[in-house]
Image (cartoon, rainbow, N blue to C red):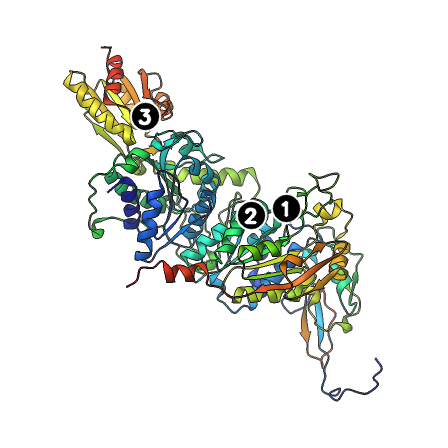
Amino acid sequence: MDGDSACAEGALAAGCRFFAGYPITPATEIAEHMARRLPELGGVFIQMEDEISAMAAVLGASCAGTKSMTATSGPGFSLMMENIGLGLVMETPCVVVNVQRAGPSTGLPTLGAQGDMMQARWGSHGHYEIIALAPASPQELFFQTITAFNLSETYRLPVMIMADEVVGHLFERVIIPDPSKIGLQSRPRPKGRKDRFKPFHPGPNGVAPMANAGEGYRVHFTGLTHDEKGYPVMTPEAHSEMVSRITGKIRANISKIIQVEEYRLEDADVALISYGISSRSSLAAVDEAREQGIRAGLLRLVTVWPFPEHAIRELAKRVKCLITVELNLGQMHLEVQRCAGGMVPALLVGHAGGTVITPARILETIHVGSGRG
Amino acid sequence: MNNNRSQNHPLDNILRTDRIPHIWCPGCGIGTAFSASLIAIQSAGTDLANTVVVSGIGCSGRGAGYVKLDSYHTTHGRAIPFATGMKLANPELSVVVFSGDGDLFAIGGNHFLHAARRNMDLTVICVNNFNYGMTGGQAAATTPNLAKTSTTPLGNPETPFNLPLLAYASGATYVARWTMLHTRDLTQSIGEALARKGFSFIEVLVPCPTGYGRRNRQKPIDSLKIYQEKTIVKNGANPAEVILDFKQGITLGKFVEYDKPTFAEAYERICRPRA
Amino acid sequence: MKFWRVPLDTEQIVVSKGMVYIIEDRCKGCGYCIEYCPRDVLEASERFNSKGYHPPAIKQPDLCVNCHYCEAICPDFAIYSLEVPVQSIPELSIQ
C-alpha cells in the first residue's frame, strides 16, 4: 500500500478513533482512508471547514478521551500552529501528520520536500518542546504512527510525524502485525479522590495524570498560563513553573524518546546524517562510497525532535566530516552544526525541494568531505 | 452580625467559589447571562458530570473558568470546533459553548456557520456586548453603525450582523435572542436548548460599561432601560425582520425552533457500513 | 388595591415571603438589584465592602416576596433570597 494508507492503518492499529481533517495534497489520502475505515471500527471521521478547526476538533476529541489525529501538509501545518500551542499547554495527546511538500506558501503541491522541519520545532509561538518523527518508508509510516500515539499518550502532547510527499505516495509492501503483538500506551490516569484531583500536578515521570471530560473530575483546562489546579495565574513565577514543567517532562525523558539508526558507522570517517526519504538516497550513497574505498556511514534520525544531540556530539568526536542530507537549504543542518561545535567540518547536501536527492549528488559531497574531491 | 444558616448562594455548588469575585466589571452583563446559564444547567436534570462548558477568548470566554464543571477555555474563535470534537468523541456529553460576539462571529464566524449547517448537537450562548471588551473596547462585527469604539473613535462605518438571521440561514434549529434583563426567559431558553438535540443558538444582549457603554454614553442602568423600554418580544418572528436598533427598537424572543437530524444522527445512519 | 368584586379565592391565596441575603464581599456596587427589585426592598448603603464598593442594604425586609429577581439579575452571585414560611418572623440578617 502507499505511505498515506499505511499511516492511516497505523493510526487505527494504535487505537485512533477520531480523525478531523481537511483535504490537502499530498495528505488527502490519509483523510480518505480514515473516512472509509473509521466508521467500520466505531470511530468518527469529520471533514472540518479548515485546518484550524480540524486541529481544534482533534484537541476536543482527545480531551473527551479518544485517541485523535489529523493529517496535513505545509499550508495546513501553518494554520494549525496556534492550536498546537493550545495542545501543548493543555497537555493534550494527539498526533499531527505533516506530509511535507515544497514550500513556502502554495509551492509545489504535488512534489515532496523536507522544508517544515524547523517549523515543527518552533512553529507555534512561545517556548516549548515537541516530539517529531521522520518515517522513511510506508512500513515506517505504519509503525511510527503507532509510536507517535504511544509517545503522545505517555507524555501528553501533540506528536508530529514529519513525512514527505515521496514517502507518502510510495507504494511498498507493508506488513501489518497481529494486533496482540502491538504495544500500546494510554494516558496516565488519575487516582484518588475526584474532588481533590489537580489536573496538572506531575506524576513521578514528570507527566500529570489526565482526567477526561465526563468522568466527574470537573477539571478546568485553559490556554492561559495556569497552576496545578488548572486555574489561570498571571505571574512570571507561575509561567516559569508551567513552561518548565511542559518542557521538563520531555527533556527529563529524552533517552526514552530519541531513536536513531546507525548504518556502517562503526569505523566511519565520513558520517551522513539524514532522515525521511533523503535517508534512502543516503543509504545508497554510503554503499557506493564504501565500494570506492571511502569509509562512509549513515546516522539516520528516526526522532528528529528532540534533536539527538548526544548522538551527533559523540559522532563528531570520532569522524572526520559530517554531511547533512535533507530536502531543504539547511534546517536540521543548523542543529548538526551546533552539536558538532566546530569539532569537525559539517557539510550540507540539500536543495529547496521538488525532487529527491540522488545518491550520485551525495557521493560528490562525500568525496569533498573525505578529501578526495 | 452573622446568621446561623450557612450563607451559600444557591449556585455555589456549581461555581468555583475559590475564584469568586470574578474579573467582570461592575455592571457587566456577562455575569447575569452566566448566572442564567448556570441556573438552567442546574435545573436541566442531566448529570452534571456529563455537562461540559467550552469557551473562547474574551470576557465572556472567562466564564468557563468560573463554572465547576469540566470546562475548556480554548483559543480565540475555536470554541465551537473544539466542542464539536468533544461531542463527537463522547456523545453522552452535554456540551455548552459560552462565548462572546467577537469570538464567535468574527474570528470564529466560519466555524459557527459550519457547525450550524451540520446541526451539531451543541448549545451556543453568545453574549453580545457589541464590542471587544477584554482588549479595551474595539469595534466588533456586532457594533452598531455610527457607534464609538476604540478603533472607530469617530463612529463605526460598518453595519453589524443580524445574528439570529445568520444562525437561521446557516441551519441552526433553535434561535433565540434575549437581554440580560429578561433573566427568566433567558434561563428558560437555555433550558430548552439543553434539553433538545441540534444546534441551538441564544444571543444575549448585555451592557459593557467599561468598553462600549463608556464611549457611547450608556451607563449600565441606561442600557438596561433601553432593554426594558425599547424591546418587544415576538416569539416566532422572522429572523430576517428582527431588528436590533437602539433607537428604533429591539426584537426579542424565540424565533426558530424545529427538528432536523443532527450530524451524529446522520453520520450513524449514512456513514456506518451496512451489516 | 380596591376590588370591584373580591376574587373567589382571596382566602386561599398566600403571598410568599422571602429573606434577602447579601454576600457583601462579592458585590461590585452595580445597583441592578436596588433598581429592579419590584418591592423596593433594597437601597444603596454608605458602607464599603472589602473591595471598596457600596453593597446594597435591606431597606424594607418585610416586603420581600421571594421573587428571586435580585438573585437572577445580580452579575456577581452576591445576593439571593430564600423562602420564609409565612408564619414565622423574618430575622434581619446580613453576612
Residue A242 seen in this snapshot: yes
Let me know if marks 2 and 3 both belong to one chain.
Answer: no
Q: Mark 2 lies on which chain?
A: B
Let me know if marks 1 and 3 both belong to one chain.
Answer: no
The image shows residue B83, relative to residue B7, as above or below, that is above
Nearer the observer, B81 or B168: B168
Query: Which of the marked residues, 2 or 1, is nearer the chain's N terminus?
Result: 2
Circle 1 sits on which residue? Answer: B141
Disc number lying in front (2 or 3): 2
The image shows residue B162, relative to residue B136, as above or below, that is below
Q: Work out how far the residue at label 2 is from the one at label 1, CA to CA, in angstroms.
A: 10 Å
Circle 2 sits on which residue? Answer: B109
Q: Is mark 1 on a helix, strand or loop?
A: loop
Nearer the observer, A31 or C10: A31
Q: Is residue B43 left or right of residue A7?
A: right
Q: Which amino acid does label 2 sit on?
A: Gly
Q: Which amino acid does label 1 sit on?
A: Ala
Residue B88 in which image quadrant = bottom left
Q: Is mark 3 on a helix, strand or loop?
A: strand
Residue B67 in which image quadrant = bottom right
Circle 3 sits on which residue? Answer: A326
Crowd rating for badge 3 (residues with CA inside 10 Å; few <14, some 14–19, many 20+):
many
Asked whether the residues under the numbered discs 2 and 1 touch, taking CB atoms below 8 Å apart as contact, a structural biologist would say yes
